[in-house]
Amino acid sequence: MKSSPITRLLSLTLLLVSTEAILVPHKVHIIVYNDLGPRKTLTIHCKSKNNSLGIRHVAYGHYYQFKFRPNFLRNTLFYCSMKWDRRVHRFDIYVQARDRAVCETCVWKVRPDGPCLFAYNRVCYSWNPA
């Protein structure tokens, strides 16, 4: 039995849509809260290999957020420098190999001793070496 051009077109469209859903990663949403303490402003600058997201100033209790689509090769990395009280710290805020199975919405709280990820449970990290 010969299929009509419309049936073939619909079948091809369905195949392409289902393939895209498998191959194209969902967007990741990063939220970074300033949990440094009252009257402490967090200055944050996040980057990837290809993008600089600019410098932001985040008041205590407030947050900075951004979204992106991880790459197909599963090696997406976003890193941030964070400054307060004349101290600068660095942290890899999204490492695809570490975070992809843990969160699509990754909620971080920046604390003086390091950032904490709140996903299924709380995981706190140390700052990257200087």
Image (tube, rainbow, N blue to C red):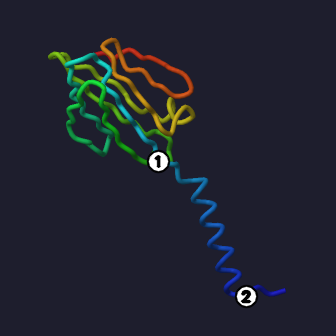
49 sits left or right of 122 in the view: left
Front-most of 105 and 14? Answer: 105
Q: Which mark is residue 4?
A: 2
Is 104 drawn above or below residue 38 in the view shown? below
Identify the residue at image location x=37%, y=28%: 92
Q: Is residue 105 rendered to the left or right of residue 56?
A: right
Indicate the position of residue 80 as horizontal and vertical percent values: 30, 30
Residue at 35%, 31% (x, y): give it: 32
Q: State the count of labels.
A: 2
Q: Which mark is residue 27?
A: 1
Looking at the rendered image, the quarter that the N terminus falls into is bottom right
Q: Few, some or many C-alpha atoms within 10 Å of disc 2 (few <14, some 14-19, many ≥20)?
A: few
Q: Nearer the viewer, residue 36 or 44?
A: 36
Q: Amino acid at mark 1?
A: Lys
| Residue 91 pos. (x, y %) | 34, 24
Q: Is residue 17 above or below residue 108?
A: below
Left or right of residue 58, residue 93 in this image:
right
**Furthest-right residue in view?**
1
Quadrant housing residue 117: top left
| Residue type for callout 2 | Ser
What SS does tag 1 mark? Answer: loop
- Quadrant containing the C terminus in the rendered view: top left
The residue furthest top is 113
Helix, strand or loop at mark 2: loop
